[in-house]
Structure formats: structure tokens, C-alpha cells
Amino acid sequence: MLNTLKNIKTSKIAAGIGLAAAATMAAAPAMAADLAPSTADYTFSVDNKYNGTGTRTLTKSGNTWNYKVNARVSGVATANQNSTFTLSGNTVIPVKASTSYRLFGIGRTHNMSFSNSGKKVTSTYRGKTHNLSSSSTALDDLSLEAQIRQDLLNGKFTGNYYMVKKDKIERTPFKKVGNTKVTVPAGTYNTVRVDRVHDDKDRTTSFWLAPSLNYLPVKVVQNDDGKKIEMELTKVR
């Protein structure tokens, strides 16, 4: 098992069990809407061999939002993500974020702090710090998801977003594929499928989001060089 799992990049496992960001498009509602606090549980698998569970929790205190993801494959790997942001109108303004994961006892942490409405970022990974800047607001994984969902709620999804990597800020595009009904352990939902647009033809990432759940992702499937990560919603609390 160890040799097989080593063939899967640790960052990809972390992304999978961290429940990567989701995106889609909706008709504009009659009135402006905001995200709503929630807690959701998921199951996920890596190559249909390694199974795990995860929980994502979105809370609010005043105009400060905190988004947490905790996930684990028992005895193999854990991942924890945390993002703090505020809302200015429809715009998510990131404040700080971190991603930590451990694989067979070996861990990595990526810390980010934001200023100037997210256009300046201090990114620290493996002891190296990079001071990054962007003409547009840069987002971590979870604040990116929050921005996309906020845009969907208000009919402002464009598909063009910018995400902080370890040593750079990268344009991260998405596209709407279509509407479909999806059955997962939590139930059957009408969803919109959205794909992340990758430059690498051997990578695909698809998301199914339910408008009835505030555009919470109910299913995510990622293929990366033949490795498959799949996530499904089990419960909304």
C-alpha cells in the first residue's frame, strides 16, 4: 500500500481530502444574497482504494467569516484547511489562510496572509517566504470557493479567478458544463456541473453544486495523470 500511495503526489492527496474549491453559474436572483453558515460531511476515495471522511464548516461572526476543512484517511493521511475572510458587498476579502497535511507522519504547511484587499500576499511554505502581488484579488482554496459561491448567488460568476500557489499567483479559470441530477449518500440533488480548466490535458476536475444548498458542492471528481480522487456529500448539519 505504501508504494502505491507514494505514486500519488502528496499535494494531490491533500487537495483531494481538503475538498478542493467549486464553481458554477446561476441566474441572477431578485435580491442580493450572501453565503450562509453551514456544516457538511463527506466521504472520499483515492483510486477507489483509500477511503476517508471530511467535514467542512463555514461560520460567521459579524462580518468575519471562517471556513474550515478537516479530513483524514485513517492511518494514512490527514489534511486541515482554514481560511478567514470578510465580505465587502459581493467581494470576498481574504485575511489569512493555512493548509496543513500529513502523509505517513510526514507533514507540510502552507501559510498565507493577505493585505491591500487581497492584492498583496505573504506566502510561506517549507521555510521559504514569498511576497506576492496581483492586480486582482488573490484567493486561497477556500476563499476562492466562497467567492465563486457568492458570485453564483448573485448571478455574477465570470469563471475568472486568481489563486495563491506556493510561490506565485495563478489565474484559475472555470467553465459551466451543464445541469444534471446527482445522487449521493446525502440524497438526490439538482446540480450544475462546472469544470476547472487545466492546461494539462491529463488533468480533469469536475464539480457538481446544488443551488438548494447555497451552491455547496455535493460531488467532486478529479483525475490527475491517471490518479482519481472522488468526493461525495453524506450529510448537511
Image (cartoon, rainbow, N blue to C red):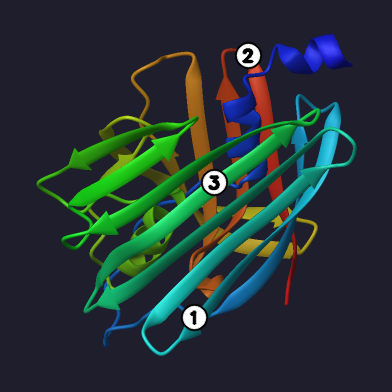
Task: Indicate the position of residue 220 as horizontal and vertical percent values.
Answer: 60, 44
In the rendered image, the quadrant that contains the C terminus is: bottom right
Q: Is residue 126 above or below residue 55?
A: above
Q: Which residue is mark 1?
A: 36
Comparing labels 3 and 2, the label whose residue is closer to the camera:
3
**Classed neighbour count for the residue bearing mark 1: other residues with Cα under 10 Å, few (<14), some (14–19), many (≥20):** few
Say what secondary structure mark 2 lies in. loop
Confirm or deny contact between disc 2 and disc 1 (CB under 8 A): no
Sequence order check: which comes first, mark 2 or mark 1? 1
Residue 99 disc label: 3
Q: Amino acid at mark 3?
A: Thr
Q: Amino acid at mark 2?
A: Gly
Is residue 26 visible to us here? no
Comparing labels 3 and 1, the label whose residue is closer to the camera:
3
Q: Nearer the viewer, residue 214 or 116?
A: 116
Q: Amino acid at mark 1?
A: Ala
Residue name at image x 84 percent, y 38 percent: 51
Q: Nearer the viewer, residue 90 or 217?
A: 90
Say what secondary structure mark 1 lies in. loop
Q: Which residue is mark 2?
A: 226
Task: Indicate the position of residue 135 as horizontal and vertical percent values.
Answer: 9, 46
In the rendered image, the quadrant that contains the N terminus is: top right
Q: Is residue 141 left or right of residue 119?
A: right
Say what secondary structure mark 3 lies in. strand
Q: CA distance from mark 3 to mark 1?
A: 23 Å
Q: Is residue 26 left or right of residue 222?
A: left
* The quarter of the displayed image where residue 75 is located: top right
